[in-house]
Image: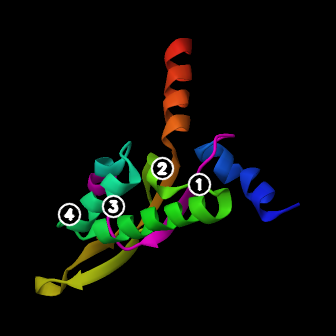
């Protein structure tokens, strides 16, 4: 069994893409809050890869750099493993899940302490050819 067949049949790939062509990448335990990362991920969901990369390159938020790295990794996976062209790809799935929270303490006045939550995120981006995304939305529209 080749690596392409193994990757196509993984449970993670099936949950994100199903049998459709495409690839995904994820970054886990990223030290940025999920709320801040979701603001950036919502900007790129459904857009073409070129448009998403341009948008992330000029976004002032700190999370944009990390999301851009995950997007570039997903595009590289699609090109090398699936043999797809970057110009034809669209961001089909983009999610940010909450990772573990590191709990820290800060000393305060009169012997008290307050808790500081250092939140982490799991960022996942999947890219698919534009025609596969369009075909998937047509199928969903008919059955509804």
Say which mark, if any, is on residue 41: none
Separation of marks 2 and 3 at Cα, in angstroms: 12 Å
| Residue 84 % position (x, y) | 59, 54
Circle 4 or circle 2, nearest the eye: 2
Residue at which label 2 appears: 89
Which of discs 4 and 3 lies nearer the camera? The answer is 3
Q: CA distance from mark 4 to mark 3?
A: 10 Å
Q: Look at the image and say whether residue 46 sits in the magenta stretch.
A: no
In space, the residues marked 4 and 2 are separated at their CA atoms by 21 Å
Sequence-first tag of 2 and 3: 3
Label for residue 59? Answer: 4
Left or right, 9 with reference to 88: right
What distance separates the C-alpha of mark 4 from that of mark 1? 27 Å
- Marks 1 and 2, Cα distance to the nearest angstrom? 8 Å
* Residue corresponding to mark 3: 53
The region drawn magenta spans 18-41
- The mark found on residue 84 in the picture is 1
Sequence-earlier tag: 1 or 2 = 1
The Cα–Cα distance between marks 3 and 1, rounded to whole angstroms, is: 17 Å
Residue 83's x, y, as percent?
A: 64, 58
Crowd tier of the residue under label 1, counting other residues whose Cα lies within 10 Å: few below 14, some 14–19, many 20 or above: some
Above or below residue 107? Residue 127 is above
Tell me: residue 7, above or below residue 76: above
Q: Nearer the viewer, mark 4 or mark 1?
A: 1
Mark 3 or 1 closer to N-term? 3
């Amino acid at each position: 069994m080749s690596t392409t067949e193994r990757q196509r049949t993984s449970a993670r790939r099936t949950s994100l893409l199903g049998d459709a062509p495409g690839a995904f990448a994820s970054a886990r335990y990223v030290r940025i809050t999920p709320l801040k990362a979701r603001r950036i991920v919502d900007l790129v969901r459904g857009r073409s890869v070129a448009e998403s990369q341009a948008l992330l390159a000029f976004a002032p938020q700190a999370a944009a750099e990390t999301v851009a790295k995950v997007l570039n990794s997903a595009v590289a996976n699609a090109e090398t493993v699936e043999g797809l062209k970057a110009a034809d790809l669209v961001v089909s799935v983009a999610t940010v899940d909450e990772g573990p929270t590191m709990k820290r303490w800060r000393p305060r006045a009169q012997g008290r302490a307050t808790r500081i939550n250092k939140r982490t995120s799991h960022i996942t981006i999947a890219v698919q050819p534009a025609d596969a995304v369009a075909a998937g939305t047509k199928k969903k529209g008919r059955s509804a």
